[in-house]
Image: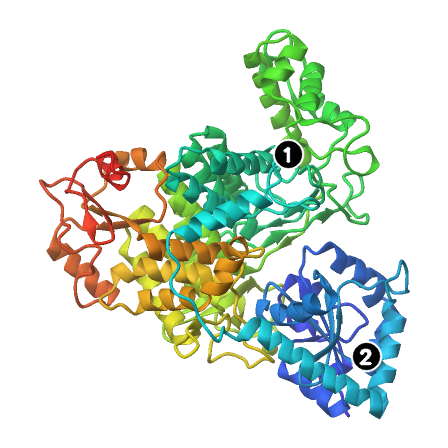
């Protein structure tokens, strides 16, 4: 077979724009992207497919590449005996979910890199995660596995056994991801929220905050469950709020939060929230920013709002495309500060030693920046005490991950200084350490712009525009405009998932219709649902009807492409998309919220903005279909619980008719309103008719009907379950109606 006929004669990843795939473009392995050519080659050569799934910021992916994929012996085995295929899980979450499902079912665990051996039809028959090149510590070696699998495939009797196993495993994937219950449930009542919050309480780590006894991950959905349950609690208990506060404090005080630059790392490797896995993901920072804004509204704790806005500031500085879209990740690894060309290691950009702090502060802080009685050396000592920087460290090689080890008051008492003097000295030392850190080699950035993840961050900026300052809406609108320009095909009415600025000359295989960049992958449910929610939230924050119109366009595609009326569920992949061995659903919250849950929340909210009831019917159908699973394990289905609560209790609609003065946010910013829907509209019905034309809606939607402005002023209507407050010009008075205080 000629090289022209057989694409597996060379590594084809140089045709890809995914940073993760391009990291492997120089491997001696003849990597193929996930496409029909690769599987056709496997059929023609009668060899299995070796599938390796990872992402750019994945530490163990880099380890396996260094140990195996850069090795000539391993490359020879892979190239001769398999068709090796590389997948970026962030580009193809559908492929990842399918093979991760069987990995978790067979091995009891998952993770990345995900390694799977498939038949040429894509059916898996062997699966695992990271494999060392040679066997060690009860782990099989990768070389030995390749040889054993090749020998088994080449033996007719063993081949038959492999094919039988592949069919059984494929059926197991279908059962896990695709099938719906034979006996759907009924729409849960408001008790589901209480049950979910109670489950969150039972599983909480009351000593160290959050959930889990080993590694600690953020669980933003659970935080929103607790916030809602606290608001609904009529018994006067504070337990929901206590657990919420414990989790928020633990994450913000510990090493998962970047105390110099803002923003959160992925997770911590310990129960105490000290040492993080240092990658920074766009989706974590989006969801945590929203959770901290809610925490501020629930508790009135200013620091939670500060953490949220510092996180958004980090995103603006370090994860924003010059034209407004949001990049995906920062890697955990970087080169040593004193050797920019040296081998990268995890955490080097972020960790400190006492000597490093003293050098940074004494070199950059002048005496006139410090209060009386404190020089630069003393300021460095105060910084080390505040952030726990010690000679022994808490990380590798005597380095320290910064945590809030002592309060400002405790540091002041220990130093015999006023809290004001210590705060001023710490501010100066922090500016110096930030400046010094900026001189270090930076972690690599994955500059994919993903529609769904951008939607999550757009929602966070839009919420900050309501809770903190209206200027945050500018970042939301710029990102929304970027995604619409590059990933939304207005003529076809369809969304693509990934945009990437091109890395160099574009071969014909990479040509796309997006000006100046490469667009790839048909949009998934998460792309439509997350982006539509972002557009809807931006409409609520700004009153711009174009954002609402875009949210409705995306919602219509959700109904047309992802809703299955017979199964009464939303699938993760579009019905017109690529056919895989299973069509997955995404029902549980994982690193990102359940796309089905977010879609159900979105559609139930948008139901009040259209002249039909189909959106609400879809939302109810999804929740009813999966009610048995949701009720059996509510905290794993946090987003669907929130959707069910929306449907059971009704949205808290706040219709704002007319021009909004600058002060309209003041009461709303400090008031937690669960299930809140902001519904700005023009003052008069004549102006509203123009909006209806933009929206493609024939009749006046319920959320705006008979709710015009009065007396030429902003007029507010608070409504829930078809009951409304009297019209008022006072936002605070309208908010009080929701709780019965007005």
The kind of secondary structure element at disc 1 is loop
Q: Give the SS element for disc 2.
A: helix
Binning the other alpha carbons within 10 Å of mark 1 as few (below 14), some (14 to 19) or many (20 upward) gives few
Left or right, residue 384 beside residue 17: right
In this figure, which residue is indicated by the disc labeled 1?
A: 207
**Could you tell me if residue 24 is visible in this image?**
no
Check the picture and name the quadrant holding the C terminus: top left
Q: Is residue 526 left or right of residue 214?
A: left
Residue 365 appears in the figure: yes
Q: Residue furthest left?
A: 711
For image coordinates 71% across by 82% down, the residue present is 166
Give the x, y percent position of residue 371: 59, 11
Residue 79's disc is: 2
Q: Quadrant of residue 739?
A: top left
Which badge, 2 or 1, is on the more N-terminal residue?
Answer: 2
Instruction: Compute the Cα span from label 2 to label 1.
Output: 52 Å
Q: Quadrant of residue 660?
A: top left
Which disc number belongs to residue 176? none
Q: Nearer the viewer, mark 2 or mark 1?
A: 1
Residue at x 47%, y 54% (from the top left corner): 456
Instruction: Assess whether mark 1 and mark 2 are in contact (beta carbons under 8 angstroms).
Output: no
Taking depth in this image into account, of 188 and 566 the one nearest to the observer is: 188
Residue 17 at x, y = what percent? 62, 66
How far across and how far down the image is residue 700, in percent?
A: 17, 61
Q: Residue at x 29, y 62 (%)?
A: 607
């Amino acid at each position: 077979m000629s090289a022209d006929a057989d694409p597996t004669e060379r590594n084809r990843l140089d045709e890809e724009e995914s940073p993760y795939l391009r990291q492997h473009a120089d491997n001696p392995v003849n990597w193929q992207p996930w496409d029909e050519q690769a599987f056709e080659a496997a059929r023609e050569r009668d060899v299995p497919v070796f599938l390796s799934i990872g992402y750019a910021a994945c530490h163990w992916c880099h380890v396996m590449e260094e140990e195996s994929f850069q090795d000539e012996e391993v490359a020879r085995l892979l190239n001769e005996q398999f068709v090796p295929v590389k997948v970026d899980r962030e580009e193809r979450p559908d492929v990842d979910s399918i093979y991760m499902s069987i990995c978790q079912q067979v091995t009891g665990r998952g993770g990345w890199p995900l390694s799977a051996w498939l038949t040429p039809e894509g059916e898996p028959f062997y699966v695992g995660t990271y494999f060392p090149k040679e066997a060690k510590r009860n782990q099989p070696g990768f070389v030995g596995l390749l040889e054993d699998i090749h020998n088994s495939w080449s033996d007719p009797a063993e081949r038959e056994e492999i094919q039988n196993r592949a069919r059984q495993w494929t059926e197991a994937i279908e059962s896990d991801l695709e099938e719906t219950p034979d006996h759907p449930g009924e729409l849960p009542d408001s008790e589901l929220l209480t049950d979910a919050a109670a489950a969150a309480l039972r599983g909480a780590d009351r000593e160290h905050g959050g959930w889990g006894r080993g590694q600690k991950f953020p669980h933003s959905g659970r935080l929103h469950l607790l916030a809602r349950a606290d608001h609904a609690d009529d018994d006067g208990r504070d337990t929901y709020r206590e657990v919420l506060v414990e989790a928020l404090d633990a994450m913000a005080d510990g090493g998962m939060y970047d105390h110099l630059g803002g923003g959160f790392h992925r997770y911590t490797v310990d129960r105490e929230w000290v040492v993080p896995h240092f990658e920074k993901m766009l989706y974590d920072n989006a969801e945590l920013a929203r959770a901290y804004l809610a925490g501020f509204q629930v508790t009135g704790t200013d620091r939670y709002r500060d953490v949220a806005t510092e996180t958004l500031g980090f995103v603006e500085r370090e994860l924003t495309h010059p034209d407004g879209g949001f990049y995906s990740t920062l890697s955990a690894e970087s080169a040593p500060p004193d050797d920019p060309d040296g081998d990268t290691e995890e955490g080097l950009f972020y960790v400190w030693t006492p000597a490093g702090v003293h050098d940074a502060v004494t070199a950059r802080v002048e005496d006139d920046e410090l209060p009386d009685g404190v020089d630069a050396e003393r300021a460095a000592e105060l910084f080390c005490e505040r952030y726990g920087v010690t000679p022994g460290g808490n990380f590798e090689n005597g380095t320290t991950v910064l945590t809030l080890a002592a309060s400002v008051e405790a540091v002041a008492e220990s130093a015999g200084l006023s809290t004001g003097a210590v705060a001023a000295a710490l501010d100066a030392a922090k500016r110096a350490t930030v400046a010094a850190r900026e001189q270090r080699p930076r972690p690599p950035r994955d500059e994919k712009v993903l529609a769904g993840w951008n939607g999550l961050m757009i929602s966070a900026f839009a919420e900050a525009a309501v809770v903190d300052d209206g200027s945050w809406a500018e970042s939301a609108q710029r990102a929304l405009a970027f995604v619409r320009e590059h990933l939304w095909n207005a003529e076809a009415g369809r969304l693509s998932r990934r945009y990437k600025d091109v890395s160099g000359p574009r071969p014909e295989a990479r040509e796309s219709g997006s000006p100046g960049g490469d667009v790839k992958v048909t949009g998934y449910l998460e792309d439509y649902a997350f982006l539509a929610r972002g557009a809807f939230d931006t409409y609520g924050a700004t009153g711009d009807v174009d954002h609402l119109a875009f949210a409705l366009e995306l919602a219509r595609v959700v109904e047309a492409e992802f809703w299955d009326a017979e199964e009464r569920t939303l699938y993760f992949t579009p019905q017109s998309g690529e056919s895989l061995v299973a069509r997955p659903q995404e029902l549980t919250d994982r690193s990102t919220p359940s796309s089905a849950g977010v879609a159900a929340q979105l559609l139930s909210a948008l139901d009040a903005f259209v002249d039909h009831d189909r959106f609400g019917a879809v939302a109810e159908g999804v929740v009813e279909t999966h009610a048995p699973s949701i009720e059996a394990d509510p905290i794993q289905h946090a987003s669907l619980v929130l959707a069910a609560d929306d449907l059971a209790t009704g949205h808290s609609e706040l219709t704002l008719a007319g021009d909004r003065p600058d002060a309209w946010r003041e009461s709303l910013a400090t008031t937690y309103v669960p299930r809140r829907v902001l519904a700005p509209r023009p003052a008069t019905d004549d102006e509203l008719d123009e909006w209806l034309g933009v929206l493609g809606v024939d009749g006046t939607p319920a959320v705006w009907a008979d709710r015009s402005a009065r007396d030429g002023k902003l007029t507010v209507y608070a409504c829930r379950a078809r009951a409304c407050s009297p019209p008022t010009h006072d936002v605070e008075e309208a908010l009080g109606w929701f709780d019965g205080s007005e």
